[in-house]
């Protein structure tokens, strides 16, 4: 596999884990394994109000998201639009669409800016910031 395929696999897994019916359990251990230790996520609120928001750690993100997912069907699919890879670091832009069922039209779209590091041959997410469009 090429580095870009490996990175694409990480992002595909990210979207697959957070997607599903509200009754489905998510594999949060597999989700945590996608991230480098100490990784931070910067939600939509950061891009709307940069001075009043901060990044959140993976377990806080999971807690917040799990509460939402337990009450809502949610399906998100991403498409990578740009890769920049230099040795063991990478930056990726991924657009996404969110739906409440696989058959309906998206209720939101947005963009993720994702940074990676390759450690021992595995790409891990070091940070992610996103904006709903």
Image (cartoon, grey):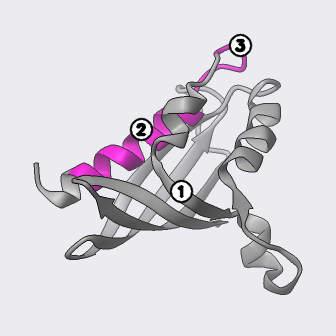
Q: Nearer the viewer, mark 1 or mark 2?
A: 1
Question: Which residue is outermost to the bottom?
Answer: 51
Q: Nearer the viewer, mark 3 or mark 2?
A: 2
Q: Main secondary structure of the magenta part?
A: helix
Quarter of image, res 132: bottom right
Q: Would you say residue 43 sits in the magenta stretch?
A: no
120 or 30: nearer the viewer? 120
Q: Residues within 10 Å of mark 2 (few under 14, many from 20)?
A: some
Residue at the (74%, 61%) spot, across then down: 56
- Locate residue 83 relative to residue 42 in the image: left or right: left
Residue at image mark 2: 13
Q: Residues within 10 Å of mark 1 (few under 14, many from 20)?
A: few
Task: Specify which label sits upstream in the sequence, 1 or 2.
Answer: 2
Check whether the beta carbons of the residues at disc 1 and disc 2 lie within 8 A of each other: no
- Give the residues drawn in magenta, as a range: 6-24
* SS of the residue under disc 1: strand
Residue at image mark 3: 23
What is the C-alpha distance between the residues marked 1 and 2?
18 Å
Quarter of image, res 18: top right
Residue at the (20%, 51%) spot, across then down: 5
Q: Which disc number belongs to residue 37?
A: 1
- Locate residue 26 relative to residue 54 in the image: left or right: left
Would residue 19 be visible to someone looking at this image?
no
Above or below: residue 69 compared with residue 53 = above
Residue at the (40%, 49%) spot, across then down: 11
Which quadrant does the C terminus fall into?
Answer: bottom right
Would residue 23 be visible to someone looking at this image?
yes
Image coordinates for residue 97, horizontal then vertical, percent: 54, 49
What is the C-alpha distance between the residues marked 3 and 2?
19 Å
Question: Which residue is outermost to the top?
Answer: 23
Q: Nearer the viewer, mark 3 or mark 1?
A: 1
């Amino acid at each position: 596999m090429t580095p870009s395929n490996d990175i694409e696999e990480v992002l595909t897994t990210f979207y697959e884990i957070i997607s599903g019916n509200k009754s489905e359990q998510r594999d949060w251990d597999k989700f945590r394994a996608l991230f480098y230790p100490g990784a931070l996520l910067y939600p939509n609120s950061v891009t709307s109000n940069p001075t009043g928001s901060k990044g959140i750690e993976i377990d806080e993100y999971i807690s917040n998201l799990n509460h939402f997912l337990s009450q809502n069907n949610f399906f998100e699919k991403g498409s990578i639009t740009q890769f920049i890879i230099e040795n063991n670091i990478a930056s990726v832009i991924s657009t996404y669409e969110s739906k409440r069922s696989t058959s309906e039209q998206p209720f939101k779209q947005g963009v993720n800016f994702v940074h990676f590091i390759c450690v021992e041959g595995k790409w891990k997410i070091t940070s992610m910031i996103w904006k709903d469009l």
